[in-house]
Image (cartoon, grey):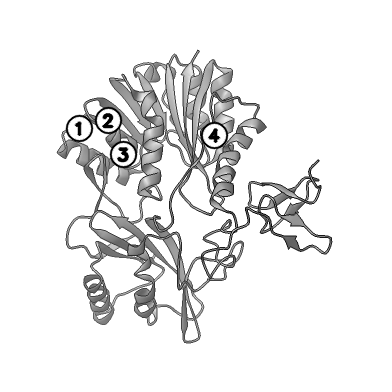
Amino acid sequence: MTDPATIIRIAAKGDGVTADGRHVPMSAPGDRLMPDGGLEYGAHHAEPPCAHYPLCGGCQLQHLDDESYAAYVRDRVAGALTGQDVEAGEVLPAYVSPPHTRRRASLRAACFGKKIALGFSSGNSHRIVDMTMCEVLHPAPFALVAPLRALLAPMVGDRRAVHAKLTLADQGVDLLLEGVSADGLEDSERLSDFAAEHKLARLSIDDGYGPQARYEPEPVTVSFGGVPVAFPPYAFLQATTDGEMALVDAVRPALEGAGVWADLFSGLGTFALSLGEGRKVYAAEAARDLVLALKGSANRAQRQVAADHRDLFRRPLTPDELNRFDAILLDPPRAGAREQVAQLAQSQMPVVAYVSCNPGSFARDAKTLIESGYRLESVQPVGQFRWSTHVELAAIFRRT
């Protein structure tokens, strides 16, 4: 019989749960809650590798060993499905990105007296943890953290936070600074010198009127399936390259034999370009700059991608439109794809691949599809945001 005070699982928000239902922060499976509120660590309680943990909000689960964290990622997905009474043919073991692979991050910077703090905010607060190390960021963007403090020191007003958004693109690190202005010649020269010294792909400023590139020696791109795509400053991109490939590989079986398929919520073409070679792909996306980037890149690469500027929340594809394709791929934002799934439920589409960054909204949409005659064949949980509670997945549905 399990001791009622033993931690048996990790809840969605990262707390450990005892056998008798108590939630215990910073606990791991196998830990034991003591009568005085302390913890007796078990075999799955790991020593956090980062000195900033747990104060830094970038990670919430560094105290779990690899086995327990992978189980948490899988359980998040399986639990969401159970909550909607959805049965999956197979929930696969989780894929988890290694340390030092995250290629994009939004950091906050603020001046407190003569000191600049730059890093992630603590959980549920505006406190900035001044970053001196990071176990999740790719070395290239992390290398800019210390130099950015010196760059921002004369540009940040007292206690006024700004954002430094970094993305590792094909040409190097793309840096977007939000909440600062650089109108004078001296500031402009400082920015250009900084970008050149640190070999940035681009440096942009957003002072409230949209990003303006101040340094860009050549057009910045990210590549999918070997096709470089023009990259708007801090546009959406999967967090890690390996996590992106895990998602691509997970949905690949759904598109086998599909001569014409649709990529809905296509973004810059992560799936349309990675999986569309030699086939016709219709790609729908609401963000105009992403549509234009995808269209231009597909044309240059002579890919058969028809990129369409379309808001699928307000104007989802109808059953008649959906039935023109051999397969459908969905990759919606966190809210899910309720409106488009309702149309899919009325269609004759034989196979649907669904990529999600929110197990809850995915499970809701999965229930709609299953109630209309689909079978959830497989689900691949993916933990790109290592040691965080943010979980992604890729699933395949087939009509029965």
Q: How many marks?
A: 4
Q: Which mark is residue 276?
A: 2
Q: Earlier in the sequence, mark 4 or mark 3?
A: 3
Label 4 vs label 3: CA separation? Answer: 21 Å
Q: Amino acid at mark 4?
A: Phe
Depth order, front residue of 71/243: 71
Depth order, front residue of 174/25: 25
Label 2 element class? loop
Which residue is most to the bottom? 114
Q: Are marks 1 and 2 in contact (CB under 8 Å)?
A: yes
Compared with 183, 341 (above or below) is above
Residue 121 spot, x, y in % from top left: 53, 66
Label 3 element class? loop
Compared with 25, 337 (above or below) is above
**Residue at the spot of label 3:** 269
Q: Earlier in the sequence, mark 3 or mark 1?
A: 3
For label 1, count other residues whose C-alpha is less than 10 Å away and answer few (under 14), some (14-19) or many (20+). some
